[in-house]
Amino acid sequence: MKSKINLNGKNILITGANGMIGYQLTKLLLDNYNCVLTLSDIHGKSRFKWPQENTFYHSVDLRTMKDCYHICQDQHIVFHLAGVKGSPKSAMTNPARYFVPMLQFNTNLLEAAKRCSADWILNTSSVGVYAESERFVESDVWKTFPSKNDWYPAWAKRMGELVLDCYRDSDGGKWTSYTSVRPANVYGLYDNFGPDSMVIPSIIKKGHKSRVIRAWGDGTPVRDFINSEDVARGMIHLVENKVNDVVNLGSGQGFKIKQIVDTIAAYYGKKVEWMGDEKNKGDNIRLMDTTLAESYGFKPTKNLKDGIKETIEWYLKNENSSRSKSNTSK
């Protein structure tokens, strides 16, 4: 039986620590383990107040190898969450803003972590790596090209996965101390509620600000949603169990966008006005196969309706402090 990683007593690095997954991951680690955390992001200071005795924050630019080596020194475990946050529409209109820095983040950070002899590396990929399909199965990715709706960010994420595979194959297949995860559509506390936000935070904000919620499209596309806390739980579970694989993190359940909008509208008591087809409405169905994650012992625990309610209530309490623009955190 494969031994597990004991996170107690470990030095753990989290990149993209100012994001919503970074927040949940940090909280879970501090609440459940006696470890020392190095938190990094491109922003000048942490968005969150953590105990100072065992958390250290570094403002770094992962596009530079020097910064990557600096934060990877003496780290046992590396959770690489950093990316460029934004909507699929903004990624299509300004692809260089996403593709180029993500290539740099992934190549530099993973190279530094490997050279600094980290015990385990977790790389965060994306649902966007998949071609349009009824259900996304991990092993299907390299049989196809990504959907045109996620073309540039998807290739950047695929390259991150390949970097780790290259290190494995360059070592004759002996080095296997890494996991890659592909989260579905993530939502939750500390989400991005700015102009480049995804569907759930966007509709939450519209519901609060507008008399009528105006939503683009017809509400028929189907998506798989997972709460950021569940993503963080899944990451920890896979690392603890030394899962050397690429694993989907999703609910495995499909929800029409109309269901999401109606749920949020009902909370506010607002009417919804559908604005017709949008040019970049995306694929019709994006649904995760979660068989592999379940075989490794992981299932999400947060109900979507409850998670949306929790996110709305958090947003209403923290509206002024919510981010107004996209950033490089998850």
Image: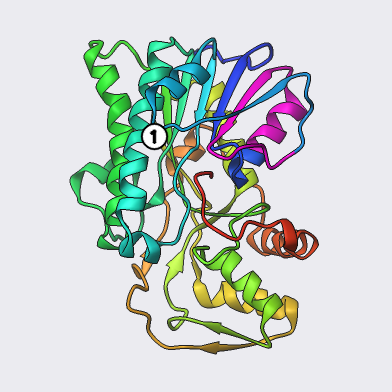
Q: Is residue 242 above or below residue 301?
A: above
Q: Position of residue 185 (x, y in %)?
A: 49, 56
Task: Assess disc 1: are there few (<14), some (14-19) or many (≥20) residues with their C-alpha within 10 Å of its C-alpha.
Answer: many
Magenta span has 123?
no
Quadrant assignment, res 177: top left
Q: Residue beneath label 1, please?
A: 105
Q: Tell me if I can see residue 274 in this picture.
A: yes
Q: Amino acid at mark 1?
A: Phe
Question: Horizontal placement of 89 versus 198: left or right?
Answer: left
The answer to which of 210 and 29 lies nearer the viewer is 210
Q: Is residue 44 above or below residue 173?
A: below
Q: Position of residue 174 (x, y in %)?
A: 30, 10
Quadrant assignment, res 112: top left
Magenta span has 26?
yes
Q: Tell me if I can see residue 134 in this picture.
A: no
Residue at 28%, 18% (x, y): give it. 167
Question: Horizontal placement of 151 versus 87: left or right?
Answer: left
Q: Which residues are magenta?
A: 24-48
Residue at 27%, 55% (x, y): give it. 151
Question: Horizontal placement of 161 versus 120: left or right?
Answer: left
Q: Position of residue 230 (x, y in %)?
A: 62, 44
